Image (cartoon, rainbow, N blue to C red):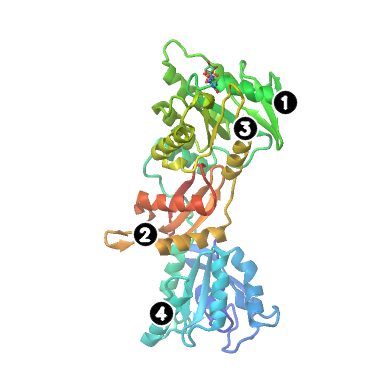
Amino acid sequence: LPVVVIAGRPNVGKSTIFNRLVGRRQALVADTPGVTRDRKEGQATVRGRAIRIIDTAGLEEAAPDTLYGRMRASSESAVANADLVLFCIDARSGITPADEHFANWLRRQGRPVLLIANKAEGRQGAAAAMEAYSLGLGAPLAISAEHGEGVADLMSEIADRLPPTDLPPVQKQSRRDRRIQQEESGEVEDVRPPGPLRLAIVGRPNAGKSTLLNRLLGEERMITGPEPGLTRDSIAVTLNDDEGPIQLVDTAGLRRKARIDETLEKMSVSASIEALKMAEVVILVLDATLGVHEQDLQIARLIEREGRCCVLALNKWDAVEDRAETRQAIKDRIEMSLAQMRGIPVVSFSALTGAGINKLLPTVRRAHEIWNRRVPTGALNRWFEMMVSRHPPPLVDGRRLKLRYITQAKARPPTFILFGTRTDQLPDDYQRYLVNGMREEFDLPGTPIRLLLRASS
Ligand code: GDP
């Protein structure tokens, strides 16, 4: 069940709220701090959905002596596992330093929070509740648990913020969307399989893939041999660098010649697809003397669609005259055509002479590390709040979209779920604003990033 935790300094009314939600007298309440509570947990139903409710008031007794110590100790583990935290203040007494202290701590925990101004009876109470805006935890919900005012609102606000029970239908079924759906449903792997990093080398005919492969094999200790389970003509090739083995996949495809009915261009793309599917990291080899062709972009799009991480290899660097200019022009072209490849790592070298080739595998390793990275939820949401307050989401049909929180669902590639209301109407450019910001903040250049939007009710 989803876990909802009631937190706040002592005596703001946590147990009363708990009782209201749980519907039975499961906790003893008195208007003095430090009264013994016999019960910390119960079940409630919001919008037909069962939830678990934890009242941290019941834990305060056992905690260390200072007020902060008590609050912290009682809340720490409960909050860490919460799907939603109900942070309560006392509207009658206003915001106290203890509330501020606790709110600051809570913000750093990165859990979704609903701010509740309790004891806000009548009009006056509602006005007093507004002071709680200053805590930076969003709009306070004014209630009076004692009098039963605002409890229905509280239930529906809780329901709005719970993690979704199942995934909403995918609207656009582009191939990329379908692929993302497969990633979500676990049809394609996420968990890092044991064994060496799997690397593919792809690119148009004559870009220098075979030359590169031979160069890599010439310089590294090589293990080759027919392996069971691989197709007849494919050979398992393993390279070693300082960090361990790297398995080159589909080296047979690399040497495959075009069938009669295939143009050279068609072949380079279809051969790349096969290799991509088996790889984690893909080196896209370009002939730098020729610049970027539509074909290269097509392959890059495939890499992105399949969620692989990509290293852009500018080969034949020995034959390039204006190096700085060429490098920039190629990078610009790729990034302009493929926003998803922003910050893509670029390595220039000559497969023929070997010059510059030593940078290639370290770059592959780093790209792989980024692709596998997980961003802690707390840091992610602190950044997210900053982004949203800097540029709030736009008005759609005169109403503002509410974005609530974000979490990383998986890695390989980094995949984030953004919760909010009417997220299906979040414009593409706002999504790009978030994704690009995320790349910078959490150092995720080059890797495909998935941002999935969920309605949080
Ligand atoms: P593939 O079709 O991508 O496997 O390309 P190949 O490896 O067969 O190379 C195509 C041509 O480009 C060959 O004539 C290579 O000698 C040449 N070539 C490959 N790498 C380089 C390089 O770094 N510099 C130069 N000048 N030529 C290269």
Q: Tag 2 or tag 1, which sits nearer the N-term?
A: 1
Q: Tag 4 or tag 1, which sits nearer the N-term?
A: 4
Residue 221: image tag: 1
Q: Tag 1 or tag 3, which sits nearer the N-term?
A: 3
Give the Cα separation between the discs numbered 1 and 2: 53 Å
Q: Secondary structure at mark 2?
A: loop
Q: Nearer the viewer, mark 1 or mark 2?
A: 1
Residue 198: image tag: 3
Give the Cα separation between the discs numbered 1 and 4: 68 Å
Tell me if 54 is positioned left or right of 122 in this view.
right
Q: Residue at x 69, y 35 (%)?
A: 195
Residue 130: image tag: 4
Residue 142 x, y percent position in the rendering: 42, 78
Quadrant location of residue 52? bottom right
Tell me if 37 is positioned left or right of 147 in this view.
right
**Circle 3/circle 2 CB separation < 8 Å:** no
Q: Secondary structure at mark 3?
A: strand
Would you call the spot at circle 1 few (<14 residues within 10 Å), some (14-19), or many (20 or more)? few
Q: Quadrant of the N terminus?
A: bottom right
The residue at the far left in this view is 397
Which amino acid type corresponds to the residue marked 4 in the rendered image? Met
Q: Residue at x 62, y 16 (%)?
A: 232
Which amino acid type corresponds to the residue marked 3 in the rendered image? Arg
Q: Secondary structure at mark 4?
A: helix
Give the Cα separation between the discs numbered 3 and 1: 16 Å
Give the Cα separation between the discs numbered 3 and 4: 56 Å
Would you call the spot at circle 2 few (<14 residues within 10 Å), some (14-19), or many (20 or more)? some
**Circle 1/circle 4 CB separation < 8 Å:** no
